[in-house]
Amino acid sequence: MSATAATAGKPSIPVPMLATLALLSAIAPLAIDMYLPGLPALGDDLHTSPAAAQLTLTTFMLGLAAGQLLMGPLSDSLGRRRPLILGTALLIVAGIGCALAPSIGVLIAFRFMQGLTGGIGVVVARAVIADRTSGDRSAKLFSIMMIITSAAPVVAPLLGGALIGPIGWRGIFYVLTGLALVMLLAVLTCVPETLPVERRHPFEAGSIAHNMGVVLRNRRYLGYTLTFSIGFGAMFAYISASPFVIQDLMGFSPGVFSILFAVNAIGIGIAGTVNTRLVGRVRPQRLLAVGVGMFVTVGIAMMLTTVFAPGVHWLLLVLMFCLTSSFGLTAGNATALALGEVRDNAGSGSAVLGTLQFVVGAIVPPLAGLGGSTSAVPMATVVLVCTLLSAGAFLTTRR
């Protein structure tokens, strides 16, 4: 069946609804990037080490993974709207807990809860698009969402850098709580139920396990999913290590770091915009191949730079921009192609994709941070390994 035929008769996704879905997907970059400039201050305030402070990133990612793995299959049974409302409401509670945390242990616990509840919105937002679109249209919408959500890592570190002085890292979490409230109101207003009762699967353990099995046995789905999720590992190596590399190793201030981080995030938006223009004229598989090729090239160049030219900071900054741009060309196409392979189990497919993405994201920070503030080589090593593994996964999708 053609993409056009597959989507014939389906309701469109109006702009307010698409913007709400993008906001739900933006919870991860918002909750990560906005407090990144405050990581060193957070560690000092709670009397903990940089490694322990970075664990607040790891536990958030684990929560995101768990929330998606739990709610993705359940949304195939319960529908999309009720899980969205519940998850977003609990996200508000988690944000308040983070803001009031008296110790690093309590903060880590509430960061896990913040990730868990935020993961519900992330996984269901993808499933909603898969409910209503397919083929080129799906790839284009996922790319548009990437453009919208790329505004989050542009604005978040700038806003975080500006607010960290007057309101501190705790104030950042209050701001995130306010954004969660806006998300809840947007869900109640703009997102209807998109999974008809006749397309839902029974709410039974056996049925859920069967659906997950169908998804996991699809070789091409797994190939596209691993291309995306392992590629995200390269991105997160940069995200988690860059505050220490740019501020401590290169000697830039938190404000300059926020600007540089925002500039790099713009690369995702530029690549996503280019992708939306090309989808329909160039097959998503070919666009994905170009993105993966760029990814590997940047990974190799970053490794060579950190080993043989560690003092050439401008070159490493340029490569960071190229890394984020490559991911912008990769993410939307890989997501659309993966979910296109499992349209009848979009919630389960979205759950596995998101879970693998954030499990990789949880593993990466401690490895990328091994150099602390003295070397960028561990970050570059993780980036290179992830880009090579991502390319290997893409090769498995060939028929």
Image: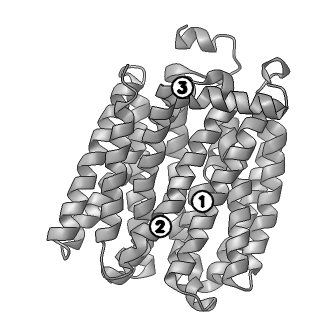
Do labels 3 and 2 touch, CB within 8 Å? no
The residue beneath circle 1 is: 61
Q: Residues within 10 Å of mark 2 (few under 14, many from 20)?
A: many
| Rendered-image quadrant of the N terminus | top right
**Chain-order first, disc 3 or disc 2:** 3
Do labels 1 and 2 touch, CB within 8 Å? yes
Q: Residues within 10 Å of mark 3 (few under 14, many from 20)?
A: few
**Chain-order first, disc 3 or disc 1:** 1
Cα–Cα span, label 3 and label 2 = 30 Å
Residue type highlighted by circle 3: Asn
The residue beneath circle 2 is: 365
Query: In the image, is 359 to the left or to the right of 211?
Result: left
Expressed as whole percent of the image width and height from the top left, the position of residue 130 reads: 63, 28
Depth check, mark 3 against mark 1: the one in front is 3
The residue beneath circle 3 is: 218
Residue at screen point 47% across, 70% down: 366
Asked which secondary structure carries label 3, the reply is: loop
Query: Which residue reaches farthest front?
Result: 206
Residue type highlighted by circle 1: Met
Residue at screen point 69% across, 11% down: 9
